[in-house]
Amino acid sequence: MLLLAPHLRAQEVPPTGKNVYVDPAGVLRWEGSRQEVALFGVNYTTPFAYSYRAHKKVGVKPELAIDQDVYHLARLGVNAFRVHVWDVEITDTLGNLLANEHLRLLDYLIQRLKERRIKIILTPIAYWGNGYPEPDTAMTGFSSIYPKGKAYNTPRAIKAQENYLGQFLNHRNQYTGQLNREDPDIIAYEVCNEPHYRQPEAEVTAFVQRMVQAMRATGYRKPIFYNIAESPAVSNAILSSPVDGFTFQWYPSGLVNGHTLRGNPLPFVDQYPIPYQQDARFRKKPHLVYEFESGDILNPVMYPAMARSFRAAGFQWATQFAYDPMALAYANTEYQTHYLNLAYTPAKAISLLIAGKVFRQVQRSQPLPSYPADTAFTGFRLSYRNGLSELNSPEEFYYTSTTTTAPRKPAALRHVVGTGSSPVATYGGTGAYFLDRVAAGVWRLELMPDANLVRDPFATTSLRQPVTRIDWNTQPLRLTLPGLGSNYTVRGINEGNSFQGVASNGAIGLTPGVYLLTAPGKTTTVYSAQTKLGNIALGEYVAPAPSAQPAQVVHAPQVQIMAGRPVTISATVLGASATDSVHLIAQHFYGQTRRLPMRRATLTTAEAVVPADLLYPGLLRYWVVVQHNGHNTTFPGSFAGSPRDWDYAPKEHWEAPIVTASAPLPLFRASQDQQLVEAGGISGGGWADYVTTASGQLALRLVQAPAAATASPTTANTPIAYLRAYFGDRLAARSVDAASFKEIVIRGRRSAGAGSVQLVLTTKDAVAYVAPLELGPEIQEIRVPISAFKLGAQVLLPRAYPGFLPLMFQAAGPAALPITQAEVLQVLLSPGASQSSQEHPSLDIESISFQ
C-alpha cells in the first residue's frame, strides 16, 4: 500500500483567475500559491466537424448540448478541457480567422467551462479534415490544401499558420469579453495536433521557432507546448526548440478494432515509460497528455490505472479523447472506438471521476509497483474480475459496480457515487447515482435513468442504430447513510419533479431525478433548486429522454451447452413492465419443447433453468416470450405471437449445440469468429487476411511483410503478426470439465520461409504461459499438450500507440497453467529467414480447440 503525506498531494481544485508558470525544475505551477498543477479531464468537440453536423441532424441546438454536457462534466469532477480546434472550419486559405458559427460556439463552450471552474488548453491547429466518420465537407481553411506532411515546409502554409495563430490568440471571446491570449482559464496552448515530420531536422526546427515567435508576438506569455510523441525521428528538433513543454498521447489497446475487446486489460497500462526521460532538455520542461483512451474497452478499470501510470511518469495534465455528447451517445457515432458519457456509459464515467481523484492525489513521479501489486493504493482499488474501480476515503465512497467493501468511515461520509449496490446503497437500476451531504441529516440524491447496451458499441455505428437504450424506470433504492435514518422523507427538486414520499426501513421506489433526502426532525425549507452546492445548483438535472423503442430482449447464446446438466439461460429484458410475464420456450431440435417461466431478479433481468432431461446431445433451440396484457411478443425478432402457436411462422431463434464432456471446446474457428477476434501485423512487420485452403475451408492467414516494406527492424524473437482470441465465456460454459482438457489442437499450415510460431495462453490475472508450435507446409492437425505451456510473457495486443510503449508483459504465477483460469489465446508469428520482396511467408489457421 502506497501512502501519501497530505502536503505532497497536488491541489484538487484549481484556483479561480490564476495563471500558471514553469519553475526552474520544469514543474508547472500556479501563480500565487506555487502549488503544482495536476488537472484531469476530457476533449469535447460539439462546436466542430461531425459533432456539430450530427447535433443539427438530430435536432438538438449545440448551445443546449454544451450546457447539458458541461454540467455532466462538472458532476464527474472534470477540471481540464482540451480540444484540437478545427482550423479548417474557422479560417480561410491565408489563415485569416472567420467569425462564423464554429468560432462562436467555441467561445460559448469556453464561457460554460469557465463557469464550472474547468481549466482549458487549446490546440489551435488540427490539420484534420472535418468529415470523419463522414466525408469532408465545406472546408474553407488552409488545412484543406496543405496536409500535415507539407504544412511545416511549404512557405505559403507556414505563413498562413503564423497569420492564424496571431489572430486566434488575439480573438476576443464574444461571451466573456476576454482575449484568448489573456483568458486566465486558458492556461496554455499546444501549437498543433499530432504533426507529421521527417528528416531533415532543420526544417522542423525552423517551423517550430516560427510558430512560437508568431504566438509570442501577440504578447502571449503563458506556456507553449509541443507534441513530441508523433514524430520520434525528429525528436531532437523538438527537444531543442523554444517551447515550454511537451505533449504525449496514449492509446494502450490501439484503435478501431471493430468490436469490444475482452480479457484483462490492466497490463496494457502498467507503466508509461518515456524514452526522453534521461535527456536534460526533457527533464527541465513539464509534460502533458493531450489525448488518452482505452479504445474499444468498456471494463471500467482502465482510466484510474492510466491516471496512476501518468502520475508515475510525471505528467501534470491528462485529457481523455473524447467525451461523447449526450445527444449523440445513444449511437456512439462521433468516434466509434471511443465511448464515454455519464448517461450512456455510467460505470465507465464513474471510473473517469475516480481517475481524476487518482491523478490529483498521487504524487508526481512517485514510483509504483507493477501489476497486480498496483491495483490497491491510497484508498483506491481496481478489480478486473469484478469490473470495479473503487475510491474509499473518509469522506468519499465511489464505485463502478456492485461492491461489498464497507465505507472507511461511515460517519464522515460526504459523497457517494456508484452504479449497482454497496453497503450504503442497494439499487435495482443500472444508471449512476450521486449522493451528496448538504447538511447533517440532509442529502442530495441525483438518480440517472437505466442504461443498457443493446449491441456492441464498438462495431460499425450509425445514427439510425442505437447501441444503448435509456429507460426511465421506477427502481427500488435502499439507503444506509449516516444521520439519515430509515424513515427519511424524499422530495423531488428538479424541474417537473413533484414527488414526495417517505422511506420504509430505508427503502423507497424512485424514478430518475434529483431529490432531497431528510432525516426525521430535519427541514429542507431553506433549500431551493437554485441553492449552490460546489459548482452545481441543487436542482440541476440533465438526462436523456427515454429511448423511443418497444420492448427488447438482449441475449448472446453460449457456444456450447453441456449434455445431461441443467443450464441457466439469462437475458436482459428492456421496456417490459414489472407486471409483464416473461418465459422461455426451449426445444430440443425435432424433440421436446418446454415453456419455462423466467425469474426476474430485477426489472431488466430474467433467467430460467433448462432441465437436464431436455439437454441430451444435439441442438437446443430457444426463444424468449414477453407477455403484456395477454399479448405475446417473441424474441429474437420481436414478432407477435409465440413459437408454440400453430401458425407462428418466423424462423429466427437462438441455438446452441449440446455436447458431451469429451467434445472439443473451440477457441477459434476461422469460419465463424472473424468479428470476435483481433488479428494483424505488428509494427509493419506483417498483416492478416482470410483465405480458403485446398479443402475449401476458411483459414486465417498471418503474413510476413516483405523485408523492404517493414516499418521497423525486427529480430527473430519479435512477433510480426498475430491472432488474439478471447474465450473466457466459452470456457465458463464448460467449467465443470475444463480441468480435464489435456491438449490444444490446431489445424493449420506454415509455408516455407515463415518464422517460428508460439502459442500463448493468458489467465484472468494476466499470467501468461507459452508453448512452441511446429507446423508443416500442408494443412495438418497438431496437438500441443497443456503441460508444454511454461510461464512466460504475453505480447500486449492490439499494439499500443505511441510505438515506444512496452510490447511485452510478464506477471508472476504458478509454474503450471491453471487451465480453468485461462481466457485469452495468442498465436504469434515471428520473422523467418531473409526473403525477397516477392515472397510472402505465411501461417494459415483453420481452427484451434481444447480437448
Image (cartoon, helix red, strand yellow):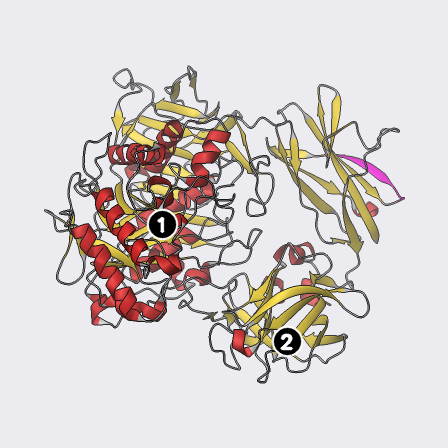
Dot label at residue 840: 2
First in sequence, mark 1 or 2: give its number: 1
Identify the element where label 2 is drawn: loop
Identify the element where label 1 is drawn: loop
State which quarter of the image contains the C terminus: bottom right
The residue under the point 80% across, 70% down is 694
Name the outermost residue toward the left: 32
Whole-number angstrom distance, CA of label 1 to CA of label 2: 38 Å
The residue under the point 25% across, 35% down is 114
Magenta-highlighted residues = 590-596
In front here: 70 or 555? Answer: 70
Q: Amino acid at mark 2?
A: His
Give how far across and how far down residue 780 sits, in percent.
77, 75
Left or right for 488, reference 615: left
Give how far across and how far down residue 7 sits, in percent.
17, 53
Dot label at residue 126: 1
The residue under the point 72% across, 65% down is 691
Q: Is residue 711 magenta?
A: no
Q: Amino acid at mark 1?
A: Ala
Mark 1 surroundings within 10 Å by alpha-carbon count, few (fewer than 14), some (14 through 19), many (20 or more): many
